[in-house]
Structures are given as C-alpha cells and as structure tokens.
Image (cartoon, rainbow, N blue to C red):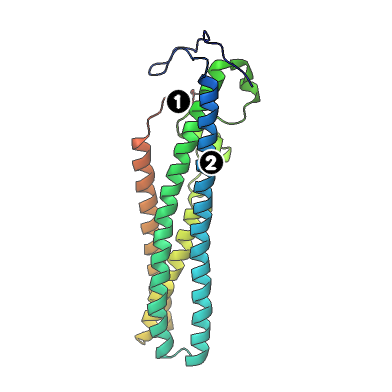
Amino acid sequence: MLEPDATIRAPPHEGTPTSFGPDALQILTTEHWSLLAARNLVYTEAMSRTSIFVASLTGSVVALALVAQATDFGDGFVAFALVLLPVVYFLGIATVVRLGQVNWEDARWIQGMNRIRHAYLEVAPELEPYFVTSRYDDDLGVLQSSVAMRRRPPWTQAFIAVPGVVAVIDSVVVGAIAAIAAIGLDLGTAVAVSVGAVAFAASLAAFAAFGRREIMKVRAGVETLFPTPQRD
C-alpha cells in the first residue's frame, strides 16, 4: 500500500486542500470501503423490493386463476380482482418510488468514490492508466463508474433499468384493473380492451413524468467538484 509523505502536494483546485497529511491515504481507503459497503446494502434493498413486488404479483395471478376457475369469471371473480389488484398496484408504486430513492443513494455513493479516486490520483498520478473507472464526479463520471458508459445513455435506458421494468409491469396491472372493471359493467370486450390500453398508457406516462422530475431534482441538487474534461 502506498504511504503518502506529509510533504506531497496535490494540484491546486478551488475548494479542495492543496496537500495531504501522512494519514490521508489510510483515511481515504477506509472511506472508500465504507461507501462500497453502503452500495452493497443499497443493491440488496433494490433486489429485495423488486422480488417482493414480483412475488406478490405472481401470487395474485395464481389466486385470480383459482377464483376464475371456481366462479367461471363471474361477478365473484370481478369483485375479487378489483379488491386484490389495486393492492398490487399500490405495492408497485411504492416499489418504483423507493427504487428511485435507492438509485439516487447509489449515485451519491459512486460520486463519493469518484472523488476519493481523484484524491488517489493526486497522490500517485502515474497510476491513472490502470484505472478503468472515473475520477470525475459529474453525471458522466458517475455513469462511467456505475455502468461503464462514456456518454449519456439513450432514452430507452429508462425501460431497461429495474425501476422502468417495474413501472411497465405495474402499468399492465392497472390496465387489467380498468379492463376487468369495464367487463364488470358489461361494456363489452372491445371497450374493456380500449379502457385497459388507455389506463396502461396513462400509468406509464405518469411513471415517466415522475422519473424525469426526480432525475432533474437530483441533478439540480448535486454539487460537482471535479467535472469531466470536455473532449474535442
């Protein structure tokens, strides 16, 4: 492990110290491991939340199938579905909201690790060719360190990430709720399908608007100390 000398000088940067003490590297390493442990906890919670939602949805579908078989898709099935599925939809909403918070927390920890990596390279700049993750703490730096992207992802990335997948599945649930309600009102199959499609689209649009608003709010509150240099 490198032991920085007390006289090592870092390149001047506004808002950052210009020298490191003899214990700086050990302190930075400890903080780096703390942030890594925090990321592991965040990842575990994200997977747990998603698993709970999927398990609840799976159990609900099985229960609906049994009730449908027992009632021959009659009024009992409609009533049971309109009681059970809204609960699943609420759980999906809570999952998406929490996953958004978890992603923000994860990005914050990655930003902190990038800043620490920047300090490492101030101590030993000759090691920069061996780092594959970023030393910068802006949006691009966080993306490079988290998903190995050197440019902003396309808009379709929102539907590949876990919150987007849960949002799509949850929107299908609300579409099913609307369609079953229409069938219960004897509006016909065609109307039920149309109502379900509209409910699906409206729910997905609401999730997209919520996600965009949260991303913009997070970006506005992030302080960047080491921005990625502009490339020609």
The nearer-to-camera label among 2 and 1 is: 2
Q: What is the x, y in percent for residue 222?
A: 37, 34
* Frontmost residue, 81 versus 155: 81
User: From where the camera sits, is residue 89 visible?
Assistant: yes
Residue at the image point whose x is 57% and y is 15% from the top: 4
User: Is 14 drawn above or below residue 187 in the view shown?
Assistant: above
Q: Is residue 191 visible?
A: no
Q: Which mark is residue 227?
A: 1
Q: Nearer the viewer, residue 116 or 220?
A: 116
Mark 1 surroundings within 10 Å by alpha-carbon count, few (fewer than 14), some (14 through 19), many (20 or more): some
Residue with the mark numbered 2:
37
Disc on the earlier residue, 2 or 1: 2
Up-down relation of residue 193 to residue 151 (above or below): below
- In the rendered image, residue 68, in percent from the top left (x then y), is placed at 49, 87
Residue at coordinates 38% horizontally, 18% vertically from top-left? Answer: 15
* Circle 1: element type: loop
**Toward the viewer: 188 or 1?**
1
SS class of the residue under badge 2? helix
Q: Which mark is residue 1?
A: none
Q: Is residue 9 above or below residue 198?
A: above
Give the residue at x 51% y 20%: 24
Counting the numbered discs, the total is 2
| Amino acid at dot 2 | Ala
